[in-house]
Image (cartoon, rainbow, N blue to C red):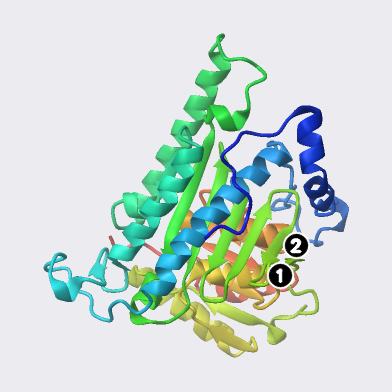
């Protein structure tokens, strides 16, 4: 399944490491994006600095493991696409319920393959990084509040572990951050777009991010149906590895500078109040943008913004596993992401607008005028 080299060994160091990694280092050196060349923005409050506190070689190894895990999960997705168009919460063990069961409501379903894909991902990650905190959607109770609390707990736990490591006098200062583990969290959605997956629509993806304390340092989205692997290492751009194995550096749409030329994707939230708010936004945008889409897979739409296929996406109450990886892809591709209230994006952000940056303020103003920037949870 893997298309990259094994990551079973620790970071290469010394002369031997430099020799073995020289070609890769030369390639990665070309990915560094000077901050002066990033997209101009109208405000400084949400400026993306691109500073990565983790050494590049450690990020490369984490990315390799993430890719291997994503491709293993992707195989499960492809082999079981369309597993069920019927969802019932009455008897999850029944044969008719083999494909999907209801979680929060009928718009929020899970299949046995979500769980299987996450088990495969977690196994691969934990084998290499047993001390990393693992936050996977299928380990969290249904509902927005539960996902919000799960992220808070993960961030608190990793920060606490990092403080304990700093205070431990018996920890060698030369030990790799990766080997120690404290401070790192893998955030994973094994199948984003489960409803599409269960119904046979090839609009679903694997997405995961690596967060150090509260900073995303790696983000990936893998579309197994098109064999497209989108990835970003903080400070080193966004890249697409297509099915021919060739890497291509990505950039958001730079020619679209006004909303009338934009293709905008709208969120499809499970919460009925959030959905009603999203419809307000769609109606307001419909007469002012070239097109509105509802793909119902945040991972793909964010990756498509980063690759210049879409202009913008707005959504409500997204969990960290839906947003963090894609947000980094967009930022590293020169785009912009903010809260729908216009404040700067943070890892805890749940209501968001992502865009190519050029139309961001215009679309935000349209949503604000329509009363589509906030809602009250129904749960």
Asked if marks 2 and 1 touch (Cβ < 8 Å), the reply is: yes
Among the 4 quarters of the image, the one containing residue 97: bottom left
Mark 1, Cα crowd under 10 Å, few <14 / some 14-19 / many 20+, is many
Q: Position of residue 182 (x, y in %)?
A: 52, 29
**Against 372, is 164 above or below?**
above
* Cα separation between marks 2 and 1: 7 Å
**Against 242, is 57 above or below?**
above
Relative to residue 293, is residue 110 drawn left or right? left
Q: Position of residue 7 (x, y in %)?
A: 59, 43
Secondary structure beneath disc 2?
A: loop
Secondary structure beneath disc 1?
A: loop
Relative to residue 221, is residue 117 drawn left or right? left
Mark 2, Cα crowd under 10 Å, few <14 / some 14-19 / many 20+, is many
Q: Residue at x 71, y 70 (%)?
A: 356
The total of numbered circles placed on residues is 2
Farthest-out residue, top: 169
Q: Residue at x 71, y 64 (%)?
A: 335
Q: Position of residue 364 (x, y in %)?
A: 62, 70
Can you say which quadrant of the picture contains the C terminus? Answer: bottom left
User: Which sits in the foreground, 78 or 93?
Assistant: 78
Q: Which mark is residue 334?
A: 2
Q: Which mark is residue 277?
A: none
Who comes first in sequence, dot 2 or dot 1?
2
Kindly tell me whether residue 317 is visible in this rendering.
no
**Against 120, is 205 above or below?**
below
**Against 304, is 19 above or below?**
above
Q: Residue at x 50, y 19 (%)?
A: 164
Kindly tell me whether residue 184 is visible in this rendering.
yes
Q: Position of residue 105 (x, y in %)?
A: 26, 69
Q: What residue would you read off at disc 1?
A: 356
Q: Residue at x 26, y 63 (%)?
A: 103
């Amino acid at each position: 399944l893997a298309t990259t080299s094994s990551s079973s060994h620790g970071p290469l160091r010394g002369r031997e490491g430099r020799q073995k990694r020289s070609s890769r280092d030369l390639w990665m050196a070309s990915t560094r994006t000077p901050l002066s060349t990033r997209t101009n923005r109208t405000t400084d409050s949400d400026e993306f600095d691109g500073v990565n506190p983790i050494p590049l070689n450690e990020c490369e190894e984490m990315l390799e493991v993430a890719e291997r895990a994503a491709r293993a999960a992707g195989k499960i997705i492809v082999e079981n696409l369309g597993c069920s168009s019927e969802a019932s919460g009455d008897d999850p063990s029944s044969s008719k319920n083999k494909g999907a069961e209801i979680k929060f409501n009928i718009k929020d379903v899970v299949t046995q393959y979500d769980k299987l894909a996450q088990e495969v991902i977690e196994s691969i990650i934990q084998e290499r990084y047993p001390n990393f905190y693992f936050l996977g959607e299928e380990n969290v109770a249904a509902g927005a509040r539960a996902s919000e609390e799960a992220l808070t707990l993960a961030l608190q736990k990793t920060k606490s572990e990092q403080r304990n490591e700093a205070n431990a006098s018996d920890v060698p200062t030369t030990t790799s951050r990766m080997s120690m583990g404290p401070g790192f969290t893998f955030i994973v959605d094994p199948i984003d777009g489960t409803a599409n997956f269960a119904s046979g629509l090839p609009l679903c993806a694997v997405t995961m991010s690596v967060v150090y304390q509260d900073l995303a340092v790696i983000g990936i989205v893998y579309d197994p149906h098109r064999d497209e692997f989108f990835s970003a290492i903080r400070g080193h751009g966004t890249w697409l590895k297509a099915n021919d194995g060739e890497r291509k550096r990505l950039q958001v749409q730079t020619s679209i500078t006004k909303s009338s030329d934009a293709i905008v994707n709208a969120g499809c939230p499970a919460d009925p109040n959030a959905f009603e708010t999203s419809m307000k936004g769609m109606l307001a945008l419909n007469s002012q943008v070239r097109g509105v889409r509802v793909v119902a897979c945040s991972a793909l739409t964010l990756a498509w913004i980063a690759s210049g296929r879409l202009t913008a996406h707005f959504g409500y109450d997204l969990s960290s596993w839906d947003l963090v990886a894609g947000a980094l892809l967009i930022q590293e591709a020169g785009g912009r992401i903010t809260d729908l209230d216009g404040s700067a994006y943070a890892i805890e952000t749940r209501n968001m607008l992502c865009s190519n940056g050029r139309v961001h303020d215009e679309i935000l103003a349209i949503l604000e005028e329509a009363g589509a920037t906030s809602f009250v949870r129904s749960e």
